[in-house]
Image: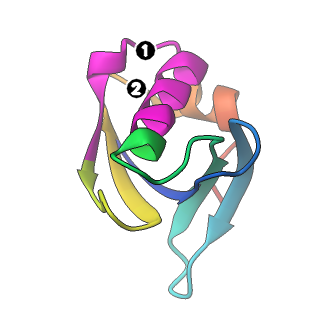
Amino acid sequence: MRLAVRLTPKGGRDAAEGWAADGEGRPYLKVRVSAPPVDGAANAALISFLAKTLKRPRASVRIVSGETSRLKMIEIEDLSDEALAAAFGPRP
């Protein structure tokens, strides 16, 4: 499954803040991490947070695009819509 995520680094804590939609109506998950955007620390924190929250191995979560931007496309292996909804609520 692919999932759009808007990441806020140095957010004080690691947490998901719910769903939002971009200007074209595409949903994305808002996530904040306490790690700074230096040397990939925020990206690593995002992968760890998603893996832990979704109860998936860390190796099954990867950034497909947006390594250096706030809006990222994440690919998560073997994730169902039901598991995603259980962790973060239904997508809008």
Residue 34 x, y percent position in the rendering: 65, 41
Q: Earlier in the sequence, mark 1 or mark 2?
A: 1
Residue 13: name its quadrant: top right
Which sits in the foreground, 71 or 42? 42
Give the residue type that dot 2 points to.
Answer: Leu
| Quarter of the rendering occupied by the N terminus | top left
Q: Are marks 1 and 2 in contact (CB under 8 Å)?
A: yes
Q: Residue at x 66, y 28 (%)?
A: 87
Which sits in the foreground, 70 or 90? 70
Q: Nearer the viewer, mark 1 or mark 2?
A: 1
The residue labelled by disc 1 is 56
Residue 80: name its quadrant: top left
Residue 66 among those drawn in magenta: no
The residue labelled by disc 2 is 79
Residue 86 x, y percent position in the rendering: 67, 27
Instruction: Name the chief secondary structure element in magenta.
Output: helix
* Number of numbered labels in the structure image: 2
Query: How would you rate the neighbour count of disc 2 (Cα within 10 Å): few for under 14, some for 14-19, many for 20 or more?
Result: some
Q: Which residues are magenta?
A: 44-63
* Callout 2: SS: loop
Residue 4: name its quadrant: bottom left
